[in-house]
């Protein structure tokens, strides 16, 4: 019961954060365009990341695909965090965006841990360890 509540809580939190940023990416908001221009990824990278974040949010909200969404989310947020470390920085608005990326990264990592049996290779390793 507690595990189920925790799972839903972390998955919904991550999905909501990801979904709220999509508006800015898909509408070409000035802040989003500026960020992806700094990264040399405007406009194709902005749209691609937006689509991938939408896919992550959907996968996180479907219990059967939570681990897959978590893994993809960890990967995408790792890229976002590295972008803050290498090019974007952590001042002003970049601080809040960077901290949101770290939060989503942690939430996705927790999701992967809670749903690790959905990942075939991990499930097989756990089964073989038990035998």
Image (tube, helix red, strand yellow):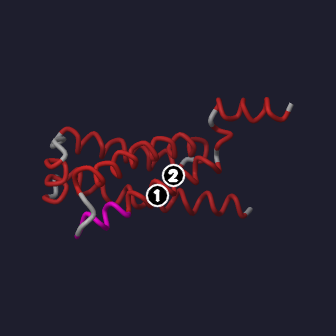
Q: Position of residue 117 (x, y in %)?
A: 68, 40
Distance between mark 2 and mark 1 Cα atoms: 7 Å
Left or right relative to 65: residue 104:
left
Q: Earlier in the sequence, mark 2 or mark 1?
A: 1
**Secondary structure beneath label 2:** helix
Residue 8 lies in the magenta-colored region: no
Left or right relative to 84: residue 104:
right
Residue bounds of the magenta highlight = 92-99
Q: Nearer the viewer, residue 35 or 22?
A: 35
Tell me whether circle 2 and circle 1 mark residues in contact (CB < 8 Å).
yes
Q: Quadrant of residue 93?
A: bottom left
Q: Is residue 123 above or below residue 42?
A: above
Residue 96 lies in the magenta-colored region: yes
**Dividing the image into 4 quarters, which one contains the C terminus?**
top right
Q: Nearer the viewer, residue 71 or 98?
A: 98
Q: Residue at x 70, y 59 (%)?
A: 3
Q: Position of residue 101 (x, y in %)?
A: 38, 57
**Closer to viewer: mark 2 or mark 1:** 2
Toward the right, the furthest residue is: 131
Badge 1 crowding class, 10 Å Cα cut-off, few under 14, some 14 to 19, many 20 or more, is many
Tag on residue 41?
none
Q: Is residue 60 above or below residue 29?
A: above
Label 2: which residue?
108
Q: Position of residue 27 (x, y in %)?
A: 19, 53
Label 1: which residue?
14
Q: Residue at x 31, y 67 (%)?
A: 96
Q: Quadrant of residue 24?
A: bottom left
Q: Residue at x 65, y 51 (%)?
A: 114
């Amino acid at each position: 019961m507690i595990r189920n509540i925790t799972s839903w809580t972390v998955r919904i939190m991550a999905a909501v954060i990801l979904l709220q940023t999509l508006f800015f990416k898909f509408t070409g908001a000035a802040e989003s365009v500026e960020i992806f221009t700094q990264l040399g990824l405007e406009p194709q990278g902005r749209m691609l990341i937006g689509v991938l974040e939408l896919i992550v949010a959907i996968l996180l909200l479907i219990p059967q695909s939570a681990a897959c969404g978590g893994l993809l989310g960890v990967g995408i947020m790792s890229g976002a965090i590295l972008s803050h470390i290498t090019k974007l920085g952590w001042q002003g608005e970049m601080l809040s965006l960077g901290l949101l990326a770290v939060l989503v990264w942690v939430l996705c990592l927790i999701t992967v841990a809670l749903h690790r049996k959905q990942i075939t290779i991990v499930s097989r390793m756990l089964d073989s360890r038990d035998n």
